[in-house]
Amino acid sequence: MSETVKIYHNPRCSKSRETLALLKENGVEPEVVLYLETPPDAATVQKLVKMLGMSSARELMRSKEDLYKELQLGDSALTEAQLVQALVDNPKLLERPIVVSHGKARIGRPPEQVLEIL
C-alpha cells in the first residue's frame, strides 16, 4: 500500500477544512482530491465503503441533503449498484471529508477521527 494520505475534500465545508488543517498540523501533506470537480468512479466508491467498514454505499451518503430525498435514495428496493451509481452521478451526496491512509479510511466528523489511521 502507498504511504500517501489522501483526502476527499470540499473547500466549502468547514469540517473538511478543519480536517485538512489537522492533517497539516500533524506533519501530513495529503493528496487533495476535490471530489466535486473529479468525482470518484464506481470502483473507488465501492473501495471507500469497504475501507470505512460500511455495509452499503447508503451509509456514505449525506441523507439530510434535499437531493437525497429528491432521488428517493432511502428506498430499500434500490440495489447496491444503484446506490453506488447515485454517488458517482451526484458527488455532492458523498459524506465528507474522507481521509484514506494505510489501506483504511475515516470520515472527518469529528476531524480527530482521521488521526486513528495515520
Image: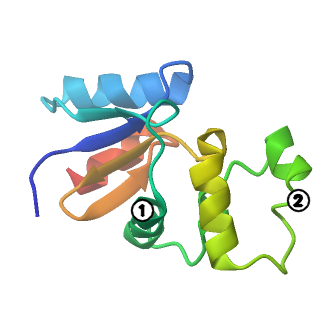
Q: Where's residue 107, x and y in %?
A: 46, 49
Q: Residue at x 69, y 48 (%)?
A: 62
Residue 59 shows in the view: no
User: In the current view of this chain or complex, which residue is farthest to the top?
Assistant: 12
Among the 4 quarters of the image, the one containing residue 67: top right
Q: Where's residue 19, x and y in %?
A: 39, 31
Q: Earlier in the sequence, mark 2 or mark 1?
A: 1
Q: CA distance from mark 2 to mark 1?
A: 22 Å
Which label number is shown at residue 72? 2
Does dot 2 land on a helix, a strand or a loop?
loop
The residue lying toward the viewer, choosing from 88 and 29, is 88
Q: Residue at x 44, y 22 (%)?
A: 17
Does residue 15 lie above or below 89 as drawn?
Answer: above
Q: Where's residue 50, x and y in %?
A: 42, 73
Left or right, residue 18 beside residue 6: right
Q: Which residue, given by chain and number where applicable, does mark 1 sit on?
A: 48
Does residue 11 lie above or below 76 as drawn?
Answer: above
